[in-house]
Amino acid sequence: MWEVKLEHNVVSNNAAISACEKSGQWQRAMALLSEMREAKLEPDVISCNAGIGACEKGGQWQRAVALLSEMREAKLEPDVISCNAGISACQKSGQWQRALALLDEMREMNVLADVISYRLAVNACEKGGHWQQALFMLRSMCLRRLDADFIAYGITAGMCEQGGHWRQVLSLHREVRGLLAME
């Protein structure tokens, strides 16, 4: 579109960035975001979410986190999709502490963490080998009255089992049985 001088807008650019995200072309997605700015088209939340997602799929956690920060600087309000993509990028790259920090930062951004946010945090703890943090994330999820996530329970129980923390495994087992009885 740029080269043949067709009219372009935020929506058409969002579609292109999304296509880059889906095909794993994080460099091209970031270039499109940059080209939008140069053309005086301000990226919106959808543009940035697709860019963060592309970075996440490309293993570029630092770029994903930087784009999340740029959104805030540009007065764009990140949403749960933005934050979850950032947490996922950190989790996939073994940056468990940064993933948990992003989960905490969601409150500052007035974004409500969802079950996926916490599952990603538990996965990050698993990757980092931190069963205590995973247990804490699981408890935080329950305190926030989010629906039980049996995947997160299973990951946490598996970590506790591998570490020989059988009391925690039994405690989690009782909790899961209680949750199943309530359904």
Image (tube, rainbow, N blue to C red):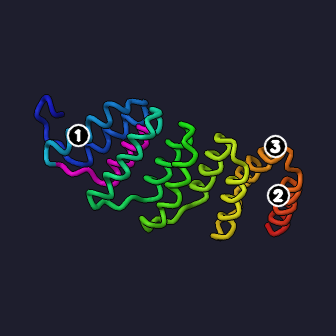
Would residue 33 appear left or right of 153 to someone viewing this image? Answer: left
| Magenta span contains residue 30 | no
Other-residue count near label 1 (Cα within 10 Å), few / some / many at <14 / 14–19 / ≥20 = some
Residue at 79% in and 66% down: 183
Q: Which residue in the structure is indicated by mark 3? A: 163
Q: Which residue is mark 2?
A: 172
Position of the N terminus, as image quadrant, is top left
Residue 175, image x, y percentages: 82, 63
Question: Which residue does the image show at 30% across and 45% down from the upper left?
Answer: 14
Does the segment drawn in magenta span residue 54? Answer: yes
The magenta-colored residue range is 41-55
In the image, taking residue 166 as reference, residue 37 lies left or right, namely left
Identify residue for label 1.
34
- Magenta segment main secondary structure: helix
Give amino acid for label 1: Ser
Q: Tag 3 or tag 1, which sits nearer the N-term? A: 1
Classify mark 3: residues with Cα within 10 Å, few (<14), some (14-19) or many (20+): few
